[in-house]
Amino acid sequence: MSQPSTDDPRYKLASILAPPQLARLGAIGATLIAATAAFAWTGGYFSPNRLDQSRMIDAFEADNGVHPGFRRNHAKGVCVDGTFDSNGAGARVSKAQVFQPGRVPVFGRFALSGGVPMVADAPTIVRSLALNFSLPDGEAWRTAMINIPVFPLKDPRAFYEQLVASRPDPKTGHPDPQALAAFVAHHPETAQAMAIIHARGFSSAFANATYNALNAFLFTSAAGVATPVRWSAEPVDAFVPAPTAADGDQNYLFESLIARVQEAPAQWHLILTIGQPGDPTDDATLPWPADRERIDAGTLSVTHITAESDGNCRDVNFDPLVLPDGIAPSDDPLLSARSAAYSTSFTRRAGEPKTPSAIQTTNQPATSQTATRP
Amino acid sequence: MIKPFSLLSRLLHWTMAILILAMLFIGVAMVSSLSDYHRLVSIHKPLGILILILVAARLANRLINPAPPLPAGMPPLLRFAAHASHWLLYGLMFALPLVGWGMLSAAGYPIALIGPFHLPAILPHDAVLYAVLRPLHTVLAFALFATFLAHLGAALMHAVVFRDGVFQSMTR
């Protein structure tokens, strides 16, 4: 028998569309539509108004304008390099490599909160310190900390509502004080947190500020014991209260930081505050009791400051959930939301054209001064 | 009747079918979720690498154990569609994890899999490169979902309309 040269009639259009087949074709079509609908539903396409990472970053852009190439929050900043010298004390609560005794390289970024990259420095704008601890075998620990003792917003929804309430009125160019007051009235936890923040007060400079991670994390020891921890970077430089008014110089906080680090490395103690059962891990607006055990895990030294540019801290997402083995997220709903929103901000700015940052450094790190013989 | 696929081929096909569908749904969910983002990303990355390993094994298996021939009476156009869509599926199954790995490298992220185990970067840290690869990952993912729909539709056509044994060669 030779191979039939003609096509099998079952593949002909007439037989595919024959009346007995129509119900089967309909069932196949319905299956494909159902699969597509399930996919679209999972991606949130049927609920365009739900709060997701795009909407959160859109709210930052609506409040601050779009400044291409810059972070959507903490837009004004400068890059730092340094080291972390672990004294080994943190190894009691976490098996993370960073807590073994020894030195690891660190880079990071000092910044002002808010999405305006050319904003003038001012005493009570929240300051941030973001860090990347570079650990062996490709591991890293990233953290983004701020100089207030508690966070004023308890979850992503409150964060978004606060952004909406802070939106500048197109007529005045300023946020509507009534909208902000109404927001706080609906969020007693924010009012309580603001009272704690104001009671603490702000320091005069970047180098003498305490930076707090605020969200709780779960540390796991080598023995497998999990411990809730909040960490902070506490300055070696003595606290000096902030003046009531800005210095007048647009960049006075950053200029004083640059001058300070030129003199000698600026240093912080990495303090791990150990939570007890019942301490809130899912609400960064609530402080933990003041008598909680504190472990001084080692010293952070900031040795160099450089302007943001290609490939340095500018192009790094300080995602607070880039964590080493031995540190895991807690049940704080802000953590996953921060990770998601930072990623969206990073993706948007990565592809945008870049313009120079507000803070430029004239000096180069000492390492670039290669000795040349005459 | 059509000769069935080898047991190993069927095992690889159905395992990967479940993993890839899960992966597509996890991917589309995580980029639009604040509360589940981290949980889903933490599954997405190691699962992507598992799929990359499996598709490499599957390509080797396919070269060693070729697919059974299509029915002799299938017209050339349908044959072409069958072959082209399969090579497209293979291409996307390789491209998606590689672009994902590459984009994490270009973004300067540590590429965490499970516990302390990390993968090396396969591309230099370059924000502009990341800005190209990140949307490419999305486009390829939607292309893979579309190709999956075509594959599912064609499989069901073979099963209930053509009834030519092609569907059974993978289910038996």
Image (spheres, rainbow, N blue to C red):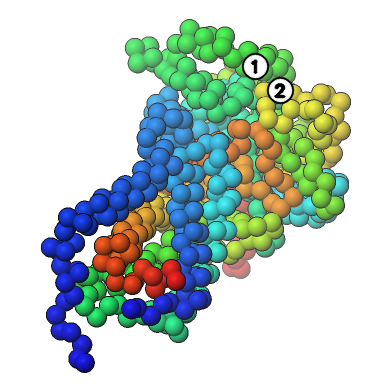
Asked if the residue under mark 1 is in contact with the one under mark 2, i.e. CB atoms within 8 Å, the reply is: yes
Whole-angstrom CA distance, mark 2 to mark 1, is 8 Å
| Badge number at residue A189 | 1
Image side of residue A224 versus residue B49, left or right: right
Tell me the subunit letter for badge 1. A
Q: Quadrant of the N terminus of chain A?
A: bottom left
Residue for badge 2:
A286
Tag 2, which secondary structure?
Answer: loop
Rendered view: B87 above or below B23: below
Find residue A171 and report its horizontal and vertical position in percent: 34, 12
**Residue at the extreme front of the image, as rendered:** A20
Asked whether residue A344 is in view, the answer is yes
Residue B145, image x and y in percent?
37, 55
Given residues A112 and B105, the one toward you in this image is: B105
Quarter placement of the C terminus of chain A? bottom right
Q: Chain of mark 2?
A: A
Residue drawn at 77 percent across, 37 percent down: A228
| 10 Å crowding of disc 2: few (<14), some (14-19), many (20+) | many
Relative to the observer, which residue lies in front, B32 or A201?
B32
| Residue at (54% x, 63% y) in the render | B49
Amino acid on which disc 2 is placed: Leu
Discs 2, 1: same chain: yes
The outermost residue toward the top is A178
Q: Position of residue B86 (x, y in %)?
A: 34, 70
Q: Residue at x 62, y 24 (%)?
A: A154
